[in-house]
Image: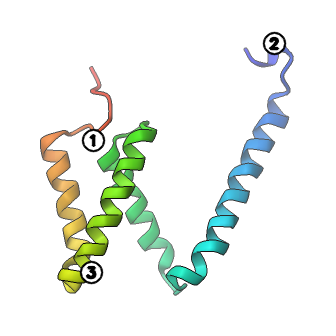
Amino acid sequence: MVSALGINVGVVFTGVFAFGAGLAALSGVLGGPLIGMYTGMESDILVTSLIVVVIGGLGSWKGSFIGAILIGLIETFGKIWFPSLSMLIVFLLMVVVLIIRPQGLFGREVA
């Protein structure tokens, strides 16, 4: 449909992909020195990203933002107060949110 309006879909797709890859590279460059890189880091980031999306609700930008803030706070306070249980606390937050609201904090209920 957009192609019928005269927009080159291939160029838009390539541009959006390049923009996303650039953002990923920028976050890697900025976050690498702060977080510290190690083998197996990708699985930790993927699990945390999944938890953020589940807590926020699928398809919700606002939910993902609030979920990321919650996870960041809970994980940081967990590392301060209960260092050996910090990841467990994050999973417990996810379980509590899913029990109370299965579609996430800002997700839409599927009919």
Q: Say few, some or many: other residues with alpha carbon within 10 Å of mark 3 (under 14 / 14 to 19 / 20 or more).
A: some
Q: Badge 2 local density, few (<14 within 10 Å), some, or many (20+)?
A: few
Measure the alpha-carbon separation of dots 2 and 1: 37 Å
Name the mark on residue 104: 1
Asked which secondary structure carries label 2, the reply is helix
The amino acid marked with disc number 1 is Gly
Q: Is residue 47 above or below residue 52?
A: below
Element type where label 3 sits in the image:
helix
Question: Which mark lies nearer to you, 1 or 3?
Answer: 3
| Disc on the earlier residue, 1 or 3 | 3
Question: Mark 2, mark 1: which one is toward the viewer?
Answer: 1
Q: How is the image coloured?
A: rainbow
* Identity, as a three-letter code, of the amino acid under mark 3: Lys
Q: Are marks 2 and 3 in contact (CB under 8 Å)?
A: no
Relative height, residue 71 to residue 30 (above, below): above
Q: Which mark is residue 79?
A: 3
Label 1 environment density (alpha carbons within 10 Å; few <14, some 14–19, many ≥20): many
Give percent across and percent down for residue 36.
53, 85
Looking at the figure, which quarter contains the N terminus? top right
SS for dot 1:
loop
Give residue 55's position: percent from left, percent from top: 30, 49
Q: To which quarter of the image does residue 94 belong?
A: bottom left
Location of the C terminus by quadrant is top left
Cα–Cα gap, marks 1 and 3: 24 Å
Percent position (x, y) of residue 18? Answer: 77, 51
Q: Is residue 31 left or right of residue 73?
A: right
Q: Nearer the viewer, mark 2 or mark 3?
A: 3
Q: Residue at x 38, y 64 (%)?
A: 48
Label 2 belongs to which residue?
Answer: 4
Q: Residue at x 23, y 64 (%)?
A: 91
Residue 44, picture quadrant: bottom left
Residue sitting at x 42%, y 48%: 65
